[in-house]
Amino acid sequence: MSDRLFAKSLPGGLKWLLRGSLAAVAVMTVVAVFFAARLSQGPIDLTFLKPQLSAALSQSTGTLEASAQGFSLQANSGKLGIIASGLEVRTEAGGLVTRADSAQVRLSIQQLLRGDVQATRLTVTGLSLIHI
């Protein structure tokens, strides 16, 4: 009975704001559970983000151009990471500087929830450096 009294005592606009906020939290919870369930089944292919991720890699290397054959999102032991496979770094003239079979960047989940992307670890396998 006290719940009804509480709901009746709120102004109309505040009731709708409260209902909308509760609905938004419910939707975000369902999306988070779905995302966690999907990640537990294996890596999520991020091929559709290849142009943006390759551009971000190249931007971070300065005058070198970095590219990868594929990207995926993976969770291992509760840790989130992006894996780039077939990674190559080239000079502006096209000369190969380095090649790696794969590189995994582990991300801070706390920082992601705050809207910031922060790498906590980089693991590279099959790295080859070429002397220019």
Image: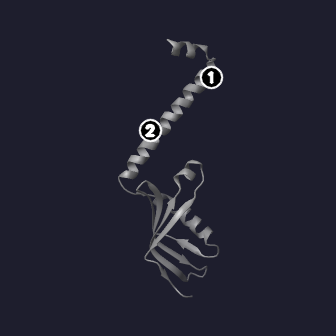
Image x and y of residue 67, in percent: 52, 71
Q: Which residue is mark 2?
A: 30
Determine the residue positioned at 56% across, 81% down. Answer: 94
The front one of 27 and 110 is 110
Q: What kind of residue is marked 2? A: Val
Determine the residue positioned at 51% across, 59% down. Answer: 49
Q: What kind of residue is marked 1? A: Leu
The front one of 106 and 89 is 106
- How far apart marks 2 and 1 lie (CA) works out to 24 Å
Image x and y of residue 112, in percent: 55, 52
Q: Secondary structure at mark 1?
A: helix
Determine the residue positioned at 62% across, 22% down. Answer: 14
Determine the residue positioned at 57% across, 52% down. Answer: 111
Image x and y of residue 12, in percent: 62, 18
Q: Mark 2 or mark 1: which comes first in sequence?
A: 1
Residue 64's image quarter? bottom right
Q: Is residue 91 above or below residue 113?
A: below
Neighbourhood count class around disc 2 (C-alpha, 10 Å): few under 14, some 14–19, many 20 upward: few
Quadrant of the frame with the C terminus: bottom right
Using the image, tell me which numbered label, if any, was put on residue 14. Answer: 1
